[in-house]
Image: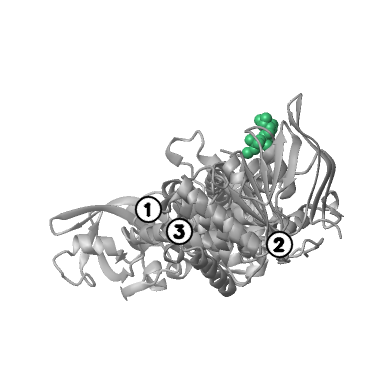
Amino acid sequence: MAPLLSLDKVSKTYFNGDLAVEVLHDISLDIEAGEFVAIMGQSGSGKSTLMNILGCLDQPTSGDYLIEAENVAGFDGDELAALRRRTFGFVFQAYNLIPTATARENVEVPAIYAGVPAGDRHERAEALLNSLKLGDRLDHRPGQLSGGQQQRVSIARALMNGGRVILADEPTGALDSQSGQEVMALLREMNANGHTVIVITHAREVAEQADRLIEIRDGRIIADRTRKRRAVPDAAIGLAQRTREGFAAIADMSEAIRMAMRALRANLFRTILTLLGIVIGVGSVVAMLAIGTGAQDSVLSRISSMGSDLLLVRPSMANFRGSAGGSNVTLVPADADAIRDLPNVAFAVPEMTSNVTLRRGNVDYQTTANGTVPQFTEAKSWAVGRGEFINRKDMETYAPVAVLGQTVVTTLFADGTDPIGQYVLVNKIPFQVIGIMSEMGASAGGTDRDDVVLVPLTTGSMRIFGQRNIRTITVKVEDASAIDLTQERIQALLNDRHKREDTQITNMSSVREAFTETSNTMKLFLGSVAAISLIVGGIGVMNIMLVSVSERTREIGVRMATGARRRDILVQFIIEALVVSAIGGAIGVVVGLGTGYAARYFGLPVAFTAGPVALAFACSFATGLIFGYLPARNASRLQPAMALSAD
Ligand code: ADP
Ligand code: MG
């Protein structure tokens, strides 16, 4: 029968830059199942290198290594990981426990990668620790255990998946002689139970306890003595056969998330700083888009309240250029009458404005007088609050009547008198108040639209305004679908009447379009500012992950030695990055919504929509994935033997 482990002319050369150093020379060695072997040699003689090759943590440079007659050179990464997981158990001089995990969790690591269900895992780990007299230390972390206790935890870990072959590299090297004796006794006991045990040591008194003693010097075997040959049963736990495991996901996702949380808690301050980057990024995306959308909605609703069947005729700006104070006669009341006669025109409401002084009793008040026509209320969607509005008869009779805005009412009638029926002086001319407008509030530009007195256009132009210029004509069309044609007709009509193009007509739907376009550009701008901060946050994640990987190189080595596939390591670190960015994203969403509500509390229009919130969270998640990938890949590409020897 083929030996369990067989080295045939194995050499190992390390390459440091151009320098190649051969540290093992043509080593040939057979180890049978059930043997208790010590490999002894001075420091630097190549013992650890040999053990790494035996444990499939490293590959020989030349020569063959056969496990039960199968050449490991033909194994791929996953198969080697499976081999380590099922066949080998490692015990190191420095224990190599994961510092953030408890004793029980450390023992369970190999079983996680073997896909053992959590319940079975806990039970077996507990049983092993109990049998190693650590039953009362299950939840202690390595830092809370003595060296001897830590080494016993690592022995339990080596046995977790069966540990058919125990490879112990200087297991007593860091221990006092008493603890060292205990560890050797344990190894002997394990051998008696059928485990093949290979102990590496530089100490003769340790080596003497083995049944077979192999001496190695400068990478060559110089002696190989079997002092005692015993027929021991092979444990045959875990079979060293080639296995192809499918691309199963990491053994236990919740386990990976817990490991991630633990690693993040271990460096709480650093984690918080990294979170902050993501929180600011996501929070600003959510808040900025909520405020931007709110502002846009409020302006749009005001524009729509003006109606999509309205056209606004004004003297064009170009007309004022070079003329003093806009004194050119452009729009006149007769223009409004002419427009009214065009087809598809429901009405045309001209407005003439001027600053005036109102007086009641001994109170003077400066406000704006607006001379207009009865359809004003309809054109502006502005209802009369109380009393009546100007009617046709008032127009025809040049009646001295006025309708007051709310601001004017509160100023002139502060004494509580009912204004309706009262007289006020407009530029010293008495007008009787016939109505009060409902409250309109401030315009988008911030001007108080209630600070106005409305009078009939006829009366106003004769007795107040003194000039015949019309400021605007609001035109309502009957059929909104033909509004463009009507707009052209009005423009042609006015050009013809004025013999030049001195008016401009705006269409509310085009105003709306232009506004939507600019505000979308604005939102895009805000969004990209926020996105940049998210990228900055992502760089923070990448930074913390790179640091984490280099700090935890040894842990990665241990995980690989206990059977983690490269994929497991990759997934674990990506999950860590995802946990950071998901927590950061969730807090960021809360902060962003909070900022939005605060802004709303202070009077800003804010609109929360699910889209940007989901998008921001998804972006933070993607950030974790993208920026976490590189560090995770670095981690997964480490060579197990190299990772284990990292400081
Ligand atoms: P031992 O365990 O017997 O003390 P090692 O196997 O660790 O010896 O090392 C054998 C020799 O190989 C030493 O000279 C050491 O410096 C060298 N060596 C070990 N690991 C590396 C490496 N990764 N790169 C280069 N040289 C190494
Ligand atoms: Mg060594």
Q: Residue at 73% of width from left, 45% of height from top?
A: 225
Q: Which mark is residue 446?
A: 1
Task: Say whether residue 511 is visible.
Answer: no
Question: Label 2: which residue?
Answer: 86
| Tag in front: 1 or 2 | 2
Question: Label 3: which residue?
Answer: 587
Q: Residue at 50% of width from left, 39% of height from top?
A: 320
Few, some or many C-alpha atoms within 10 Å of disc 1 (few <14, some 14-19, many ≥20)?
Answer: few
Q: Is residue 226 left or right of residue 283?
A: right
Q: Nearer the viewer, residue 182 or 545?
A: 182
Tell me the CA gap for discs 3 and 1.
Answer: 36 Å
Percent position (x, y) of residue 615?
58, 60
Tell me the CA gap for discs 2 and 3.
Answer: 42 Å
Q: Quadrant of ligand 1?
A: top right
Q: Residue at 71% of width from left, 50% of height from top?
A: 55
Q: Earlier in the sequence, mark 3 or mark 1?
A: 1
Residue at the far front: name it: 227
